Amino acid sequence: METIILLLFVCILLGCVLLDISILYALLLGYILFAVYSFKKGFSFKEIIRMSLEGVKTAKNILITFVLIGILTALWRAGGTIPTIVCYSVKIMQPKLFFVITFLLNALVSFLTGTSFGTAATIGAICVTMGHALELNPIMVGGAMLSGAFFGDRCSPVSTSALLVADLTKTDLYKNIKLMLKTAVVPFLLTCLIYTVYGFLSPVNGAQMLDIHALFAKEFRMNVFTIIPALLILILALCKIKVKATMLVSIVVSIIVCMTCQGLSLKEIITFSILGFESADPALSSMINGGGIISMFRVGAIVCISSSYSGIFHNTGLLNPVTYIIENIGQKLSAYAVTLLTSIATSVIVCNQTLAIMLTQQLCSHIEKDKQKLAIHIENSAVIVAPLVPWSIAGSVALASAGAPLTSLAASFYLILIPLWNLFAQHKQA
């Protein structure tokens, strides 16, 4: 019976993907399916609700953090923080180094903002536009952009995926970040080398570099003060201040910057914090609009529904047959190899990063008893495998928002090299 229920869930997810229906509807139908299964197993309606709430309760901290991230990203836009970072970054762009600089700039912005989607829609979109003007290979430009966008999505102190993994595994976020950076040093350097070599081998044609500074200067006052909110994130993260406290400090300073540097009223700041920033200039709207609490609704809803699954799975034993198979495989392969295989399967099936992370954690927690190791295994598998699946929203949405082709997934070397390198490292240790 369990196998039939899981296959039905897979069919629902795939059906939504093929019909281009929001994954939220698939998750809601999945919840109804699992609730009916629980009822058939003898659980009352009240018990099913209790199990669901148990799962959602585990995600309480991450949901609060989502709200803070929504406010933070909106105020960084409104206050000129992101425009200033983008303008200063673009100044160092050189045609022959275009691919590696695209990777590094997107890595920097994603580390500061913790969001792949936000990075792709800002500096990512700018890099793709410049690459088009210079008539560079769009697949390689998109791959460099996506690689950089998920650098921070994986290891930023304000990344929702990093916070989710730390919360699920009950590990320290900053210790996780330290280990994430350590296990990705070689893939990072190899990625830089590949993009650098390819850049020098590629002919540069087309138009001149875009004058982004003049474009942003029409709406924003950009100076050293507008960068302070972003610098605070870096400084406080290095001091290992708690994430929520770090973001609150940055939010307060961003409010001051919005008022003093951009002349915004308190009403405008509150509106942007809730609904997201909207530029008055149509030429800027596609690059800078976004953020706000409302922007986190979708990912928050996915986490809530996915968390309710975990409560039902835990109490009903629905995943026991799958767990048994994984444990058998675990006797033959390393814990990381099993985690990677599981993450590939979950990413292909569930089509989004959040649920892939949660299912991988639940299915592999019996394979790797060390919570710290499990956290890093997930960071080096589910977090960066999900965006490589063509029909997953993780990578496809980021590429679409930047205007890059879906085939850029094949040139996202940072995402490809992390699991390959860690498989090699694990095998070498064994």
Image (cartoon, rainbow, N blue to C red):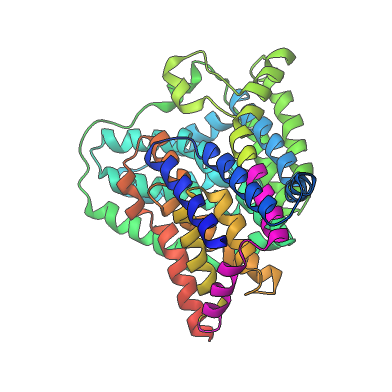
Along the line of sight, which residue is nearer the eye, 397 or 425?
397
301 with respect to 341 (left or right) = right
Along the line of sight, which residue is nearer the eye, 327 or 249?
327
Q: Quadrant of residue 81?
A: top right
- Is 319 in the magenta? yes
- Is 142 in the magenta? no
**For the magenta stretch, what is the residue range?**
303-332
What percent of the width, then of the height, locates residue 155?
Answer: 59, 54
397 with respect to 170 (left or right) = left
What percent of the width, then of the height, locates residue 291?
Answer: 59, 29
What percent of the width, then of the height, locates residue 338?
Answer: 52, 73
Which residue is depicted at the point 48% across and 32% down? 87
Which residue is depicted at the point 28% across and 31% down? 208
**Number of callouts:** 0
Q: Is residue 105 visible?
A: no
203 with respect to 408 (left or right) = left
Q: Quadrant of the N terminus?
A: bottom right
Give the overall secondary structure of the magenta segment. helix
Which residue is depicted at the point 55% across and 83% down? 331
Extreme residue in the bottom direction? 430
Along the line of sight, which residue is nearer the eye, 359 or 425?
359
Up-down relation of residue 424 to residue 341 (above or below): below
Up-down relation of residue 221 to residue 13 (above or below): above
Q: Is residue 240 visible?
A: yes
142 with respect to 361 (left or right) = left
What percent of the width, then of the height, locates residue 216?
Answer: 48, 22
Up-down relation of residue 307 to residue 252 (above or below): below
